[in-house]
Amino acid sequence: MHFKIPKEKEVPLGCITPAPVTEQPMMITGNWRIYRPVIDAEKCNLCMSCIIFCPDACWQLNAEEDEPVWNAKYCKGCSICINECTSGALTQAYELDFEDGVVRLEKPF
């Protein structure tokens, strides 16, 4: 069988697909997290390890203030950023110790 794939759903040659340019609200995975990374801005040396090693791109550089910013909605709590931090600026804290708690979806799927 041969299926006609709509042009907007075709996968580019080499199977490299562009990353979404906006947040995907139905793909929130922060509710999987048990522990979250906490940054100590005083210790941060802007090595960018958190940004480079995060598998879900939950860290971004705020260029105006020269500091990494964490996106809680998509962080699964894998702790890779904590392990890779060269200055020890990132530590692990229990998720339920925070007022905002765990990010939850109103409707699972």
Image (tube, rainbow, N blue to C red):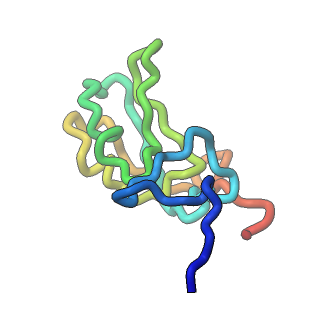
Say whether residue 30 is left or right of residue 57.
Answer: right
- Residue at 45% x, 57% y is 77
Depth check, front residue: 67 or 8? 8
- Quarter of image, res 95: bottom right
- Residue at 64% x, 50% y is 24
Depth check, front residue: 45 or 23? 23
User: For the view shown, which residue lies furthest in the left direction?
Assistant: 86
Residue 73 image offset from top left, x and y in percent: 60, 49
Instruction: Identify the image quadrant of the N terminus.
Output: bottom right
Against 66, residue 97 (above or below) is below
- Quarter of image, res 28: bottom right
Residue 101 image offset from top left, x and y in percent: 65, 52
Against 47, residue 63 (above or below) is above
Residue 22 image offset from top left, x and y in percent: 61, 40
User: For the view shown, which residue lies furthest in the right direction?
Assistant: 106
Depth check, front residue: 35 or 72? 72
Say whether residue 75 is left or right of residue 105.
Answer: left
Instruction: Identify the image quadrant of the C terminus.
Output: bottom right
Depth check, front residue: 59 or 5? 5
User: For the view shown, which residue lies furthest in the top direction?
Assistant: 64
Residue 66 image offset from top left, x and y in percent: 39, 17
Count of marks, rendered view: 0
